[in-house]
Image: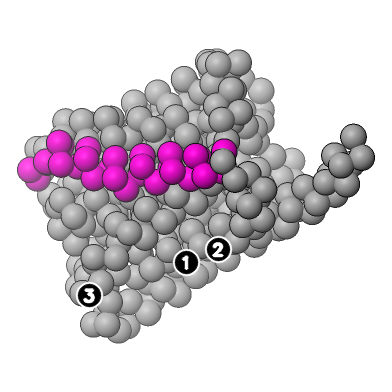
């Protein structure tokens, strides 16, 4: 008991530092990405040939996500299966169809349409847990939904992309699935295993993880924007409109599903955040690898917008 009492302040201090770091990171995240995107548009040449760094950086991000998880986080799936199941079904059942409908309604060209649909087929965003926390949502549910949707991504993301985006561009579903296993599944499980084996060591590193993710995603966006600078000037507003509509639909549908099934307000907020925020960095990386630089643009723009909208809605809900 004395040892536990001595360790408690250290744990509380670490948690407080982690929370402060996460709040600051999610607040500054859109500004940093906007600055990075502006830099890439103004001087794209130095970044055009750095596409080979995108997948390794995504692996770093997903490894960091794995470090934030622990096996008890998955217990909520078994204790409260309904909200987790509803959230994952909304994530993979509604958002891909919303992406397809927006691509059809705006008559996007094939590359952009495939990119928007791929964003809709991606798992939950890595920043959604922090936004759910800031919005006074159900953080345990947020972690469970992000984890489950991420673990299902190697199967569902390629299949849904093939179904909905295959009419626009050829989709190598098998190769895409293997890429997601390498980029997402292996790093997440590796981070989870490392935290299980060395919990105290990982706890010390947790406050720095949001900044590592912010830096990595910002650089991914810079490279994607630099490779597609001409397309952004040609269709920038149209892409922004598609992304805003997609994100707004996800936030609204997620909250509506939670309300329809009588979930508490905190869980409804979490559903909105989880369904509305996709892993757009992964979508941008996959689109650039399997489609074209233009197809990666929606993912890059989404990385900016959904964090901006997430910060705004979290601030609004936090006051209520």
Q: Is 26 on the left or on the right of 245, as rendered? A: right
Q: Is residue 221 visible?
A: yes
Q: Residue at x 60, y 51 (%)?
A: 202
The quadrant in which the N terminus is found is top right
Q: Residues within 10 Å of mark 2 (few under 14, many from 20)?
A: some
| Marker disc for residue 215 | 1
Residue 48 tag number: 3
Give the residues drawn in magenta, as a range.
169-196
Q: Secondary structure at mark 2?
A: helix
Nearest to the observer: residue 73 or residue 281: 73
Disc 3 to disc 2, how far (Cα)? Answer: 24 Å
Residue 180 on the magenta segment: yes
User: Mark 3 or mark 2, which has the lower sequence index?
Assistant: 3
177 and 280: which is toward the camera: 177
Residue at label 2?
Answer: 211
Residue 276 percent across, percent down from the top left: 46, 40
Left or right, 125 with respect to 238, comes to right
């Amino acid at each position: 008991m004395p040892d536990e009492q001595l360790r408690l302040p250290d744990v509380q201090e670490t948690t407080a530092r982690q929370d402060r770091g996460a709040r600051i990171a999610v607040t500054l995240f859109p500004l940093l990405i906007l600055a990075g995107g502006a830099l890439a548009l103004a001087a794209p040449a130095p970044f055009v040939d750095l596409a080979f760094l995108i997948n390794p950086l995504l692996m770093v991000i997903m490894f960091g996500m794995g470090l934030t998880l622990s096996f008890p986080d998955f217990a909520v799936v078994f204790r409260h299966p309904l909200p987790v199941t509803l959230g994952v079904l909304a994530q993979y059942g509604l958002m891909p169809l919303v992406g397809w409908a927006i691509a059809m309604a705006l008559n996007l060209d094939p590359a952009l349409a495939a990119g928007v649909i791929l964003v809709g087929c991606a798992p939950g965003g890595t920043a959604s847990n922090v936004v759910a926390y800031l919005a006074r949502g159900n953080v345990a549910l947020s972690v469970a939904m992000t984890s489950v949707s991420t673990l299902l991504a190697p199967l569902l993301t390629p299949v849904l992309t093939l179904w909905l985006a295959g009419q626009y561009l050829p989709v190598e579903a098998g190769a895409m699935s293997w890429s997601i296993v390498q980029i997402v599944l292996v790093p997440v499980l590796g981070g989870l295993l490392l935290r299980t084996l060395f919990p105290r060591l990982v706890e010390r590193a947790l406050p720095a993880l949001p900044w590592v993710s912010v830096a990595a995603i910002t650089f991914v966006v810079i490279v994607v924007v630099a490779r597609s600078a001409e397309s952004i000037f040609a269709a920038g507003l149209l892409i922004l409109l598609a992304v805003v509509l997609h994100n707004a639909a996800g936030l609204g549908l997620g909250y509506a599903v939670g309300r329809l099934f009588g979930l508490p307000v905190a869980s409804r907020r979490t559903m909105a955040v989880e369904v509305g925020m996709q892993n757009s960095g992964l979508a941008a990386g996959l689109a650039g690898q399997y489609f074209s630089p233009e197809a990666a643009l929606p993912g890059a723009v989404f990385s900016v917008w959904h964090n901006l909208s997430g910060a705004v809605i979290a601030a609004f809900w936090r006051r209520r």
